[in-house]
Image: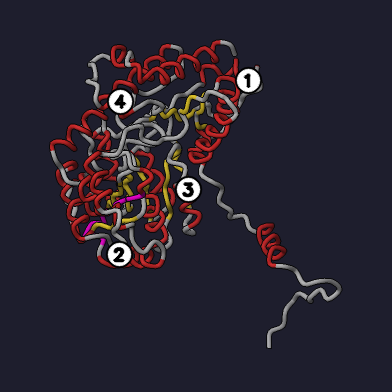
Amino acid sequence: MPTSTTSPDVSGPAPSAADWLGRGYADDHNATAASDTLLINEQSRLLETQGRRIIKFGFGQSPFPVFAPAVETLAEHAADKAYLPVQGMAELRESVAAFHRHMDGTDWRAERVLIAPGSKLLLFALMKALPRAEVLIPAPAWVSYVPQAKLAGQPAVRLETSFDSRWLVTPAQLDRHCREHGPGLRLLILNAPGNPTGLSYAPEMQRELAAVAKRHGVLVLSDEIYGPLDHRGEHRPFARDYPEGTLTTSGLSKWCGAGGWRLGVMNVPEALGDELLTRLLGIASETWSSVTSPVQAAAITAYSVTLALEMYLDAQRQWLSMIGQWCAQRLEATGIRTHAPDGGFYLFPDFGAYREALRARGITTSAELTAALLEEAGIALLPGSAFGCEPTQLTARLAYVDFDGAALLVRPCPDDPEAAMAAPELATVRHGIEAMLVWLSTV
């Protein structure tokens, strides 16, 4: 019979459950911290309760109201209480597939669509469903990709990007990595328009990247949650260039303003076979079971392409484009390198031009920079280090969403950014950008 190598301590009381837990934590180096994007929102709220005025450029929540017809459907189905199919209601999956065929020109099929309580869970479920795979994640990238890979037991590798590459993984970079590290299953996670950058691939560069992924057998997870908010309405899904190897996720949180409804969608291409979809459904059945019934009913309305939906999306795109262009121009004019956004509602400014002045203040990292901006100027940004950048790289994510989106939706958007920014609803955004520039001028 095997015997324990550790003799029990009989001189005192037996350890409690809390004691054992503490000992386990001391030896466990796989703890997952809370999401930086959620923490900055809570921190901003706390400062506001203390009487501080905070410009909330940190948390990336849509400022626009939920699509009104979907809200009406939600109310009509508030009493629905049945458990629904794990994969999602058949009618909803049909609506989702038709929506993406119409919007993106991709071949989504209802039988290959999976509905979940937010795309975040779908991303994790995919990593968990795969056999051991190297997960390639750009730096910068959304804060949850690396922790999710860690939770799923998959090795995560950062692919460093730069301002000059528009914070995008290049075809040559992916090809070089695959050649240097040899064959094996890899999952490349892409996000366009991007969080934290607001940037997308140009069509030719995307085609080249897709060709490299195909050549090396790289699986691609294309997180296109901001796709319908491409400012020109010209989002190009990655699956259009690599349909056989691209899984696509999206959901209601950004383009439909319904983050708190928690509804995400995934398309699993038929070319990847049935085993992966079966595994995903197995994970779903043992974890979230199904998305809440009223929200699925409302999502059928949200995903039904109508003139009202097209107008709703177009109004958001116009305003977000004008605001993003104005903010980027103001930052660029003062030496803060900033790419104008292609979609969504983020900028990723580089404060490197102020490095020496900031160093004189004892500020040498992006986290120190954003902490000083919050404390001294009342401006909440997220540091580039939260998105995987080197701590000394003086970058930050700016979410230009601190405005009344409901009021803007009923106001025609001028063609000129200066005229658009004169809208009274955008006073807080204007003040936040100018206050940040004033603060930088004093360092």
Q: Give the mark nearer the N terminus: 3 vs 4.
A: 3
User: Are dots 1 and 2 in contact, CB under 8 Å?
Assistant: no
Looking at the image, which residue sits at the far right?
11
Q: Give the CA distance from mark 1 to mark 2.
A: 59 Å
Closer to the observer: label 1 or label 2?
A: 2
- 3D distance between C-alphas at marks 4 and 1: 42 Å
Give yes or no for residue 202 being in the magenta stretch.
Answer: no
Dot 3: element: helix
Looking at marks 1 and 3 on the same chain, the residue that comes earlier in the sequence is marked by 3
Quadrant where the N terminus sits is bottom right
Q: Could you classify mark 1 by the number of other residues whose Cα lies within 10 Å: few (under 14), some (14-19), or many (20 or more)?
A: few
Does residue 131 appear in this view?
yes
Q: Residue at x 68, y 84 (%)?
A: 2
Q: Which mark is residue 82?
A: 2
Colour scheme in use: secondary structure
Whether residues under marks 1 and 3 lie with C-beta atoms below 8 angstroms apart, the answer is no
- Residue 319: x and y, percent? 28, 24
Closer to the N terminus: mark 1 or mark 2? 2
- Badges 3 and 2: C-beta atoms under 8 Å apart? no
- Residue 407's disc is 4
**What type is the residue that disc 1 sits on?**
Arg
Which numbered marker is on residue 359?
A: 1
